[in-house]
Image (cartoon, rainbow, N blue to C red):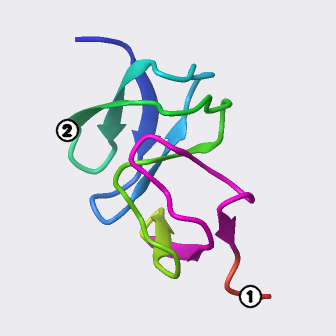
Amino acid sequence: MSEVRFLIHGSADNVGVATADIKAEEDVVGLYMDSQKTVELKAEEEIPLGHKIALCDVNVGDSIIKYGHDIGKVVVPIKKGDHVHIHNLKTRRW
C-alpha cells in the first residue's frame, strides 16, 4: 500500500486534510480515521500540507463537511481531487 497522504476524520466528511504537500496530478491515498478504510484519488491541483482535498464533486451552495461538521458553503464548483480553500469555500457565519 502507498503512503497515506491525507486523513479523513469521519465517513460523513467530504474533504480530507493533507498530511504532506501533494502535487497536482499525483495519485494519493487517504485514510478514514473512524474506520481505518483507505481511499485513493488523483489530486487535480497542488494541495499544501494542512489544506483540504475534495473527496467528491461538490456544487455551489453545498456544504463542506469536515470533522463531521458543516464548515462552510461552496461558492465555486469543486471537483474530486481539487484544493478546497478560501477561493472556493466561504464560511456560513458571514
Task: Name the spot of residue 16 as percent of width and height, x first.
Answer: 46, 46
Q: Is residue 39 above or below residue 26?
A: below
Residue shown at the point (65%, 38%) measured from the top left:
50
Q: For residue 37, which numbered disc appears in the image?
A: 2
Check residue 81 for magenta coloring: yes
Q: Are marks 1 and 2 in contact (CB under 8 Å)?
A: no
- Judge left or right: residue 23 versus residue 59: right
> In what element is the residue under mark 2?
loop
Q: Amino acid at mark 1?
A: Arg
Q: Amino acid at mark 2?
A: Lys
Number of numbered discs overlaid on the protein picture: 2
Check residue 80 for magenta coloring: yes
Identify the image quadrant of residue 86.
Answer: bottom right
Give the number of the mark in front: 1 or 2. Answer: 1
Residue shown at the point (61%, 33%) measured from the top left:
47
Task: Name the spot of residue 85 as percent of width and height, x first.
Answer: 68, 54
Identify the image quadrant of residue 32.
Answer: top left
Q: Which comes sooner in the sequence, label 1 or label 2?
A: 2
Magenta range is 69-90
The image quadrant where one finds the C terminus is: bottom right
Residue shown at the point (34%, 57%) measured from the top left:
10
Task: Name the spot of residue 26 as percent of width and height, x first.
Answer: 45, 18
- Judge left or right: residue 57 versus residue 82: left
The image quadrant where one finds the N terminus is: top left
Q: For residue 75, which numbered disc appears in the image?
A: none
Give the residue pinned by disc 1. Answer: 93
